[in-house]
Amino acid sequence: MSILVIGEHDNASLRPSTLNVVTAAKVLGDTVDVLIAGSDCQGATREAGTISGVARVLVADDLALADGLAENLAPLVQSIAQNYSHILAPATTYGKNLLPRAAALLDVQQISDISGIESADTFVRPIYAGNAMATVRSKDALKLITVRTTSFEAAEQAGSAAIEPISGGVDAQLSTFAGEELTRSERPELTTADIIVSGGRGMQSSENFAMLEALADKLGAAVGASRAAVDAGYVPNDYQVGQTGKVVAPSVYIAVGISGAIQHLAGMKDSKIIVAINKDEEAPIFQVADYGWVSDLFEAIPQLDAALESNQA
């Protein structure tokens, strides 16, 4: 079976999510192609060509595809779909926007957010905010699937795939790209960080998040937050971890002042090690934590900060 992975990129470089999806694709078949659709996207194309296990990189380079508009990308996916048994994309904003449109054009049912593969037609996906797992089987000849990237290891980049230009860039004139405002940070990006320090409503104010930012800088970590902290205006929306935020699986996740609502746990419970700091010993976060510290965070964080400084000295 031939599998197509839709590469997520910014034209200049490939998003790490694509590497995880390729790993899932290799479970399904021996022949894996990656689609890079963009404009002036040589950088992303070169990176895709180095992914181990990829046979070909299909490159659609057209101005209509420059901004990754799903309305323009979906017809392209439709035009090449007959060559594949499965089409996979990351379960990120990019994939969640694109694949349902392509599925509608192809008249097939999309399978969303899979975390496991049992066979070519049977998949496992979380439901009820991750509190249960559903096993789903598809009878469609062509299967369109979004992949929970935290459930699959990133593929290595030691390959040398063939690069094949294709046509298909058409402006559907259904939407236009108005612009973007990106948050710039020297810290690691949340979804790829090895260590994350997250704060919840217990932080009490945006000013108090400076404590976590200082701790994160010492650890080389990213900073996250619960929805409660975001809704309270303590930090921007792109800090949010959870069912309606970003799904992460770092080596270490430090939850500070976070009670542990199921919506938050859905976004971080796959972390390798979870450390919880909360003054409420009955907080649900302790049920999933590997290490729990029952303490007032305004006492615990300075102590942890001092211990790190002492260790680094």
Image: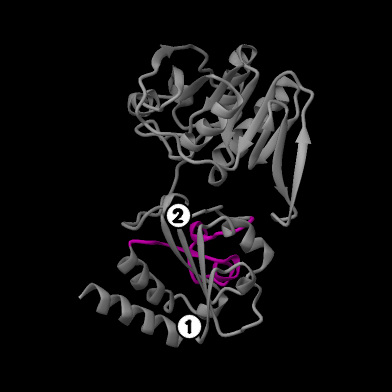
Sequence-first disc among 1 and 2: 2
Q: Nearer the viewer, residue 204 or 48?
A: 48
Identify the element where label 1 is drawn: helix
Identify the element where label 2 is drawn: helix
At x 73%, y 57%, the residue is: 131
* Residue 70 in sight here: no
Say which quarter of the image contains residue 62: top left
- Residue 241 lies within the magenta run: yes
* Residue 165 in sight here: yes
Q: Is residue 82 above or below residue 13?
A: above
Q: Quadrant of the C terminus?
A: bottom left
Q: Nearer the viewer, residue 279 or 289?
A: 289
Dot 2, crowdedness within 10 Å: few (<14), some or many (≥20)? many
Q: Which residues are magenta?
A: 220-243
At x 53%, y 57%, the residue is: 271
Q: Is residue 181 above or below residue 297?
A: above
Q: Quadrant of the N terminus?
A: top right
Say which quarter of the image contains residue 141: top right
Q: Which mark is residue 297?
A: 1
Q: Which residue has dot 2 on it? A: 190
